[in-house]
Image (spheres, grey):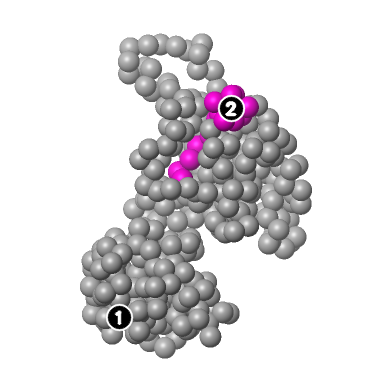
Amino acid sequence: MKILVADSIAISAIESLKNEFEVVVHHYSPDELLNEIANFHAVIVRSATKIPREVIKKGSQLKVIGRAGVGVDNIDVKAASEKGIFVVNSPRASSISVAEMAFAFMLSLSRKIVHASNKTKNGEWPKKQLKGTELFGKTLGFVGCGRIGAEVVIRAHAFGMKCIVYDPYLPSEVFKKMGVEQVKDLNYLFKESDYITIHALLTDETRGMIGKKEMEMMKSTAYIVNCARGGIIDEDALYEALKKGEIAGAGLDVFAVEPAKQNKLFELENLYVSPHIGASTKEAQERAGMITAEQVTLVLNGKNPQFCVNAKDIK
């Protein structure tokens, strides 16, 4: 059987696949992928390559689509399900890396690390202008709390933070197990939190869910961090809130349109950004590649995968 590795994954994962299958490592353009997909039984992607309905329709031999990561918004899962194609991912691979990234933003914003570094390198010594705040004793609000959110909770407790969590899909016993307060009213979370961290998937339900109204509820001293998916925060509303000082700051690793090489948000000093690198650690990429390779191998060998996002919907 033949596997296309369309985006960069760990070499060790590619080598493990080559033990059993023919593997082609190549990033095709959208038009090229349409022409070539019929030659493959499996395709593995990260976030760069899109697998829309038209690609799936032409994938006459496709049995499985692997996502070396968590989010599958670059794959038309419904179309895959209709054709009986498994969509597998690696949900545990990047949890620690993204959780640490969220904390990196919170700490950097709280202590104005970027400003401090830039000004000191420029020969300035503005100690009085760089008074920060502690995380200790602050309330951290979670919009969604899956595997990554759970890792953030562990670190938040270590910093002495109070965690309040909004996630309508989690059973009550999970909140108790994590030692967090369950919040059923999202408005309450926005009003009470000193920091807000987003750990939700991008869906029709979550797209633009944090907009002007929500930011007006937030404390003027509050910070919001998004290392999940772009589009959950309304960027126009965020721009206005940051520019007017309605909230203290924000940290974004993700954007509604990527690559985000131009964005009016970038003119704001109280915004820290990075180019969607939350999962970009050596450890996370190794885990993501190996887990995805294992899942694809299981499907191609006629076995049930452990991490399948559409197992119940395959027709």
* Residue that numbered label 2 is attached to: 248
The residue range painted magenta reads 240-255
Q: Earlier in the sequence, mark 1 or mark 2?
A: 1
Q: Disc 1 residue type?
A: Ala
Front label number (1 vs 2): 1
Give the amino acid at mark 2.
Answer: Ala
Circle 1 residue: 38
In front: 31, or 287? Answer: 31
Q: Is residue 294 left or right of residue 315?
A: left
* Residue 174, horizontal then vertical, whole percent: 69, 60
Crowding at dot 1, Cα within 10 Å, few <14 / some 14-19 / many 20+, comes out as some
Q: Is residue 212 visible?
A: yes
The one of 13 and 244 positioned closer to us in this rendering: 244
Q: Residue at x 46, y 33 (%)?
A: 265
Residue that appears at 35% across and 40% down = 261
- Camera-side residue of 224 and 158: 224
